[in-house]
Image (cartoon, rainbow, N blue to C red):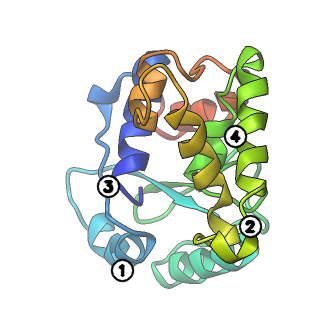
């Protein structure tokens, strides 16, 4: 996975969903580029039988997917679906390898778009108010790029909670976000299939 936010979100989600993480490790790489550039070495680790890659689709999921396909082809993988399967991809090759593009393998987005799926219905008024507040920022005062709207939205909403500014991983653990949301099921099912849990 890309970074520490991803790591803590997934640790919280797996704990809440009772996914036995003792049967696989979770490693943050710092960035997509570091993950991409280090994949060949990860595939050579002897004691690792299965590897899962979780990355943001970002603004252009087709571009991200094309880059991953080229990389995986160069590493000996074939039969890579195009576009990625909505339920996540699992490939055979040097190692069993799974790929998940955040948020759902289909649309542009980042980790925060995935976590937004866990906002409860009862919290929607405040969630929508946070989005409205962001949209009211005058254009000449808007400092973040449009591609980071989901991040600004999530952290604005989290800033308005009982414990303002709680990180996303803790927000899952402390029930600010609903880890049991059925919207997380495709991702959880992919993890279970990938690691044969």
Q: Nearer the viewer, mark 3 or mark 2?
A: 2
Q: Which mark is residue 7?
A: none
Q: Nearer the viewer, mark 1 or mark 4?
A: 4
Asked whether, in this view, residue 127 is left or right of residue 33, the answer is: right
**Disc 1 element:** helix
Extreme residue in the left direction: 46
| Position of 85 relative to 57 (above/below) | above
Residue position for label 1? 37
Residue at the image position 78 percent from the left and 25 percent from the top = 125
**Disc 4 element:** helix
Residue at the image position 59 percent from the left and 83 percent from the top = 70
Q: Nearer the viewer, mark 4 or mark 3?
A: 4
Asked whether, in this view, residue 91 is left or right of residue 38, the answer is: right
Q: Mark 2 or mark 4, which is nearer the start of the sequence?
A: 4
Residue at the image position 65 percent from the left and 30 percent from the top = 184
Residue position for label 2? 138
Q: Is residue 102 visible?
A: no
Q: Mark 3 or mark 1, which is nearer the start of the sequence?
A: 3
Q: CA distance from mark 4 to mark 2?
A: 15 Å
Q: Is residue 91 visible?
A: yes
């Amino acid at each position: 996975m890309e970074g520490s936010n991803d790591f803590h979100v997934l640790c919280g989600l797996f704990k809440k969903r009772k996914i036995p993480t003792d049967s696989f490790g979770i490693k943050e790489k710092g960035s997509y580029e570091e993950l991409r550039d280090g994949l060949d070495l990860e595939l050579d680790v002897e004691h690792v039988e299965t590897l899962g890659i979780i990355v943001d689709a970002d603004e252009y999921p087709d571009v991200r997917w094309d880059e991953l396909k080229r990389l995986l082809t160069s590493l000996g993988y074939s039969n890579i679906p195009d576009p990625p399967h909505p339920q996540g991809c699992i490939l055979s090759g040097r190692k069993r390898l799974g790929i998940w593009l955040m948020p759902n393998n289909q649309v542009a987005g980042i980790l925060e778009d995935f976590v937004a799926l866990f906002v409860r219905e009862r919290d929607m008024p405040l969630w929508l108010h946070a989005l409205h507040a962001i949209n009211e920022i005058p254009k000449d005062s808007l400092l973040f790029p449009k591609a980071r709207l989901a991040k600004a939205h999530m952290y604005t909403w989290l800033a308005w909670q009982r414990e303002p500014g709680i990180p996303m991983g803790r927000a899952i653990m402390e029930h600010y976000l609903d880890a049991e949301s059925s919207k997380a099921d495709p991702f959880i099912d992919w993890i279970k299939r990938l690691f044969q849990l």
